Image (cartoon, rainbow, N blue to C red):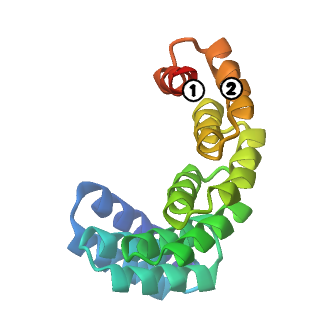
């Protein structure tokens, strides 16, 4: 019981110090949490976040991978993808964002990054199933629908895009992004 309590306290302190921007203290408490409970991914995710804040992407990648080895969560997989994206490893980034979305289709960070990488790789068509799946979940539906419409316009599928934009503008006529895309199609 004592180890579990130590783990919880150290993890919470790590989170607090990270939030306050004291990366040395955050790292110290996340390390203590990891040594108290090596079966939890949370301290490794915290340590990876500290490494990212310090611009140590190689260390962050190792820590995200360690977190994924302990518990393969969408957050760990998305973190790996983010590091690969920053390192210019676009296919690896895309693949990890896709894995993250298979774990949780509601991970908007993974979705947005997957779309970005699909443009980078010239495979926008491959992003559509993920956008459609997230749209079905109802998460950020308006923004996801506008992004989906943008991808469809890019792919030359204007009529499908128009339907999505009309749905957005019907529910929210003030959506600037939808208006701009709609106007682009009309031009």
Relative to 1, 60 lies left or right: left
In the picture, residue 29 is in which quadrant?
bottom left
Mark sitting earlier along the chain (2/1): 2
* CB contact under 8 Å: marks 2 and 1: yes
x and y percentages locating residue 127 in the rendered image = 66, 56
Task: Answer few, some or many: residues within 10 Å of disc 1's Cα (few below 14, many 20 plus, some between 14 and 19).
Answer: few
Q: Which mark's residue is nearer the viewer, 2 or 1?
A: 1
In the foreground, 37 or 187: 187
For residue 3, above or below residue 10:
below
Asked if residue 37 can be seen in this view, the reply is no
Relative to 57, 181 lies left or right: right
Q: Who's the residue at 68% across and 26% down the image?
A: 162
Residue designated by label 2: 162
Q: Who's the residue at 64% across and 78% down the image?
A: 71
- What secondary structure is marked by label 1? helix
Asked if residue 150 can be seen in this view, the reply is yes
Task: Determine the CA span between mark 2 and mark 1.
Answer: 8 Å
In the foreground, 186 or 70: 186
In the picture, residue 22 is in which quadrant?
bottom left
x and y percentages locating residue 74 in the rendered image = 62, 65
Task: Answer few, some or many: residues within 10 Å of disc 2's Cα (few below 14, many 20 plus, some between 14 and 19).
Answer: many
Q: Who's the residue at 61% across and 86% down the image?
A: 69
Relative to 81, 104 lies left or right: right
x and y percentages locating residue 126 in the rendered image = 69, 60
For residue 53, above or below residue 128:
below
Q: Who's the residue at 44% across and 70% down the image?
A: 85
In the picture, residue 47 is in which quadrant?
bottom left
x and y percentages locating residue 6 in the rendered image = 46, 76
Residue designated by label 1: 185
């Amino acid at each position: 019981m004592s180890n579990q309590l130590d783990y919880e306290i150290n993890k919470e302190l790590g989170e607090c110090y990270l939030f306050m921007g004291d990366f040395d203290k955050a790292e110290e408490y996340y390390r203590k949490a990891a040594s108290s409970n090596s079966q939890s991914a949370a301290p490794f995710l915290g340590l990876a976040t500290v490494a990212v804040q310090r611009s140590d992407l190689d260390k962050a990648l190792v820590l995200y991978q360690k977190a994924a080895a302990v518990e393969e969560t969408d957050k760990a997989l998305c973190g790996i993808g983010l590091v690969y994206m920053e390192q210019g490893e676009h296919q690896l980034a895309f693949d990890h964002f896709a894995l993250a979305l298979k774990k949780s289709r509601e991970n908007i960070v993974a979705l947005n990054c997957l779309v970005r990488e699909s443009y980078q790789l010239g495979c926008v068509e491959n992003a559509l199933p993920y956008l459609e799946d997230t749209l079905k979940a109802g998460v950020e539906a308006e923004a996801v629908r506008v992004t989906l419409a943008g991808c469809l316009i890019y792919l030359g599928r204007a009529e499908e895009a128009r339907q999505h934009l009309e749905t957005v503008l019907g529910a929210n006529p003030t959506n600037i992004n939808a208006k701009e895309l709609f106007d682009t199609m009309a031009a």
